[in-house]
Image (cartoon, rainbow, N blue to C red):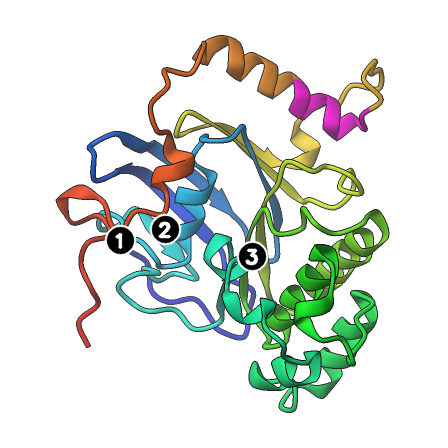
């Protein structure tokens, strides 16, 4: 693995021949290789069970990968315990504290709102949050806005997002994506975002990664992909490309076999052969 990158600059992400097995010995990832440059905004595209969550959890350091297969900012995210990595996925969304009778002010203060008042105020405005809300009495969409603010108040260098905007309305989602784009334009940071919702994303990503059945089928800068000007589904040009990918993936995969796929196994305690089973040694 290369030496740690300059922490004052945006980190890169490099994956080399990465494979991953779940505890039931089913394959979650197969020989994945990709390289995402510093300051990039990457969309991770694929059907349910394609391996997106598994890859994001490995990049975040929540799962151990074989030596020299994953580098985030020049370091192993599991072994080196990276600083400045924020991963917002299912565990974060299901945190029970956000459904209790607690105020938004208290929640934001508990995650550093008083230390980063300007970021807190900006996120409150971007996500249209009422600081007087009580969390047990808000809608799912309002609750998700507060969760996003909680997760993003502390400045991060790597942001890994796993389907966390599904409850946002169109305007809130548009404002949130604009905020993320501004972050990469004005701070040294890098984003990987897994989503099935492509509204307001046509001009957002710098890179695309297409995953299917635990493999990366293609990846690269957005401008290297052929985006058709003609579509019959009402989608954007990006949406037409992704729809074509998913239809082709379905044909090649065939019917589901009724067993549990990586969508469920991605949150197992750890993989076999030590992939995710070990703990860090201080």
Residue at 31% from the left image edge and 53% from the top image edge: 63
Most extreme residue toward the left is: 273
In this rendering, position of residue 32 left or right of residue 167: left
Q: Is residue 107 visible?
A: yes
Viewer-nearest residue: 172 or 64: 172
Between circles 3 and 2, the one closer to the viewer is 2
Q: Choose top left, top right, bottom left or bottom right for residue 205.
A: top right
Q: Choose top left, top right, bottom left or bottom right for residue 147.
A: bottom right
Magenta region includes residue 99: no
Q: Which residue is mark 1?
A: 64
Compared to residue 11, the image places residue 120 above or below, namely: below
Callout 3: few (<14), some (14-19), or many (20+) C-alpha neighbours within 10 Å?
Answer: some
Q: Indicate which disc, 3 or 2, sits on the residue closer to the N terminus.
A: 3
Compared to residue 215, the image places residue 123 above or below, namely: below
Between circles 3 and 1, the one closer to the viewer is 1
Viewer-nearest residue: 268 or 218: 268
Residue at 20% from the left image edge and 64% from the top image edge: 279
Q: Which residue is mark 2?
A: 58
Q: Which residue is mark 3?
A: 38
What range of the chain is rendered magenta? 235-243
Q: Position of residue 193 (x, y in %)?
A: 59, 48
Quadrant in the picture for the N terminus: bottom left
Quadrant in the picture for the C terminus: bottom left
Residue at 46% from the left image edge and 57% from the top image edge: 91
How far apart are the alpha carbons under marks 3 and 2? 18 Å
Callout 2: few (<14), some (14-19), or many (20+) C-alpha neighbours within 10 Å?
Answer: some
In this rendering, position of residue 47 left or right of residue 265: right
């Amino acid at each position: 693995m290369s030496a740690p990158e300059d922490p004052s600059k945006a980190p890169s992400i490099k994956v080399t021949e990465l494979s991953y097995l779940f505890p039931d010995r089913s394959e979650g990832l197969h020989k994945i290789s990709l390289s995402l440059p510093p300051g990039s905004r990457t969309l991770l595209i694929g059907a349910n069970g394609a391996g997106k969550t598994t890859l994001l959890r490995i990049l975040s350091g929540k799962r151990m990968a074989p030596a020299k297969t994953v580098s985030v900012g020049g370091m192993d995210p599991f072994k080196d315990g990276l600083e400045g990595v924020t991963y917002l996925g299912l565990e974060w969304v299901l945190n029970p504290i956000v459904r209790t009778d607690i105020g938004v002010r208290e929640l934001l203060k508990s995650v550093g709102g008083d230390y980063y008042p300007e970021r807190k105020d900006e996120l409150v405005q971007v996500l249209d949050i009422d600081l007087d809300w009580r969390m047990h009495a808000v809608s799912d969409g309002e609750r998700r806005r507060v969760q996003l603010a909680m997760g993003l108040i502390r400045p991060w260098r790597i942001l890994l997002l796993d389907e966390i905007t599904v409850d946002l309305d169109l305007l809130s989602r548009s404002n949130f994506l604009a905020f993320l784009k501004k972050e990469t334009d004005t701070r040294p940071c890098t984003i990987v975002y897994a989503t099935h919702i492509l509204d307001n994303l046509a001009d957002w990503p710098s890179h695309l990664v297409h995953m299917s059945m635990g493999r990366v089928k293609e990846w690269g800068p957005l401008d290297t992909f052929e985006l058709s000007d003609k579509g019959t589904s009402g989608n954007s040009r990006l949406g037409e490309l992704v729809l074509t990918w998913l239809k082709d993936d379905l044909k090649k995969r065939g019917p589901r076999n009724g067993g549990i796929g990586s969508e469920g196994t991605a949150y197992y305690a750890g993989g076999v052969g030590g992939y995710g089973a070990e703990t860090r040694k201080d």
